[in-house]
């Protein structure tokens, strides 16, 4: 942060408006605020801290009691602070809760606390209001500065008698302060991630170690070397067994071929036996077939006569029917005569 201009009104020992133009330093980054006791040196720091965080630089003084006892009643206690962060320029304005006279008539009224912060457009454009409430302005300043009020007082603005707070801070508090001061939060997160990864790896290592011990115990060995020797022996036995299996499979293949050939020969032998049995049966039936062949020859010769015989039978039937009709006709003739 680089201060540019500080304007105070009715603040501390400054009863009227007082402007502190840091631009007169000409870009110097190291300067001294000096003067006799009670001249208002600490008030300059109070005004800066009050504008940013709504509290004083030493935190012993109540911000609401910083109104000048010598200010005119109509002058409002107010602080306006311009500063830069990097290439950006900001302006913050604060007024504490205070009593002021009525604009008309007698009496006073309590004016509520007021705060607003702008981002100033250096190109001449409109200023952007970043926050306009007491707490939100403080939160916006914390976001921009990266410090809480206590850390800002301890690191950036060390008031009188408070330097020892940084020196006397415990390691945890000092680590937080220096981390924000030097922007090492990323490295802390990396360190935390590495610690977490280390812890996870340690857990996995323990799990694998326990599993290794269990496997060695199940294998009946005491260490990995013995397991390696056993593994080498097992590999050698496996190699020999693989060779034996290959030889046995080759023999099995040969035997399967011989078995297939033998089964084929058995089938042929069975077919021969069936053929011989059929031949013997045919030979035994040869005489019967010969008799049947002769009967078939006689039948074939008699087959043309069967037609004539059937025709003779048909004519004989017709003759018998004609004789019957003739007898009936004669009887009819006799009756007629």
Image (tube, helix red, strand yellow):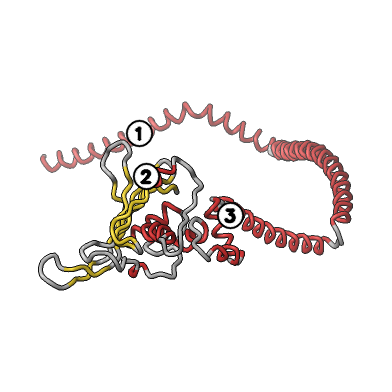
Picture quarter containing residue 220? bottom right
* Residue 51 screen position, x and y as percent: 36, 58
What residue is shown with label 1?
314
Rounded to the nearest angstrom, the CA distance separating label 1 from label 3 is 134 Å
Residue displayed at 36% across by 67% down:
63
Return the disc, 2 or 1, that comes first in the chain's sequence. 2
Q: Under tag 3, what secondary structure?
A: helix
Q: Counting other residues with Cα less than 10 Å from the Cα at mark 1, is it few (<14), some (14-19), or many (20 or more)?
A: few
Q: Is residue 280 visible?
A: no
Q: Quadrant of the C terminus?
A: top left
Picture quarter containing residue 140? bottom left
Residue displayed at 58% across by 60% down:
175
What residue is shown with label 3?
188
What residue is shown with label 2?
89
Residue displayed at 29% across by 46% down:
128
Q: Under tag 1, what secondary structure?
A: helix
Q: Is residue 216 visible?
A: yes
* Foreground tag (1 vs 3): 3
* Residue 331 screen position, x and y as percent: 18, 42
Residue displayed at 57% across by 32% down:
296
In front of the other: 219 or 59:
59
Q: Under tag 2, what secondary structure?
A: strand
In front of the other: 9 or 310:
9
């Amino acid at each position: 942060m680089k201060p540019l201009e500080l304007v105070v009104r009715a603040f501390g020992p400054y009863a009227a408006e007082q402007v502190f133009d840091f631009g007169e330093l000409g870009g110097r980054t190291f300067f001294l605020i000096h003067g006799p006791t009670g001249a208002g040196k600490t008030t300059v720091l109070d005004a800066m801290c009050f504008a940013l965080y709504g509290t004083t630089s030493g935190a012993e003084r109540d911000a609401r009691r910083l109104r000048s006892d010598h200010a005119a009643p109509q002058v409002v206690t107010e602080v306006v602070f311009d500063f830069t962060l990097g290439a950006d320029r900001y302006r913050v304005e604060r007024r504490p809760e205070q009593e002021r006279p009525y604009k008309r008539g007698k009496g006073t009224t309590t004016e509520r606390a007021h705060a607003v912060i702008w981002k100033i457009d250096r190109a001449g454009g409109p200023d952007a209001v970043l926050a306009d409430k007491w707490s939100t302005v403080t939160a916006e300043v914390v976001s921009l500065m990266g410090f809480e009020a206590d850390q800002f007082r301890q690191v950036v603005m060390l008031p009188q008698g408070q330097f020892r707070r940084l020196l006397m801070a415990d390691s945890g508090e000092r680590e937080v302060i220096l981390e924000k001061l030097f922007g090492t939060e990323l490295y802390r997160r990396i360190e935390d991630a590495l610690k977490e990864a280390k812890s996870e790896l340690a857990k996995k290592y323990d799990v694998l170690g326990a599993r290794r011990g269990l496997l060695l115990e199940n294998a009946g060995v005491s260490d990995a070397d013995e397991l390696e020797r056993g593994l080498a022996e097992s590999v050698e036995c496996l190699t020999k067994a693989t060779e034996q299996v290959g030889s046995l499979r080759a023999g099995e293949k040969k035997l399967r071929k011989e078995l297939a050939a033998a089964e084929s020969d058995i089938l042929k032998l069975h077919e021969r036996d069936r053929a011989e049995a059929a031949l013997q049966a045919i030979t035994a039936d040869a005489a019967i077939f010969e008799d049947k062949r002769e009967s078939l020859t006689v039948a074939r010769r008699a087959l043309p006569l069967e037609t004539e015989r059937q025709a003779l039978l048909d004519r004989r039937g017709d003759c018998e029917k004609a004789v019957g009709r003739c007898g009936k006709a004669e009887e009819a003739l006799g009756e007629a005569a």
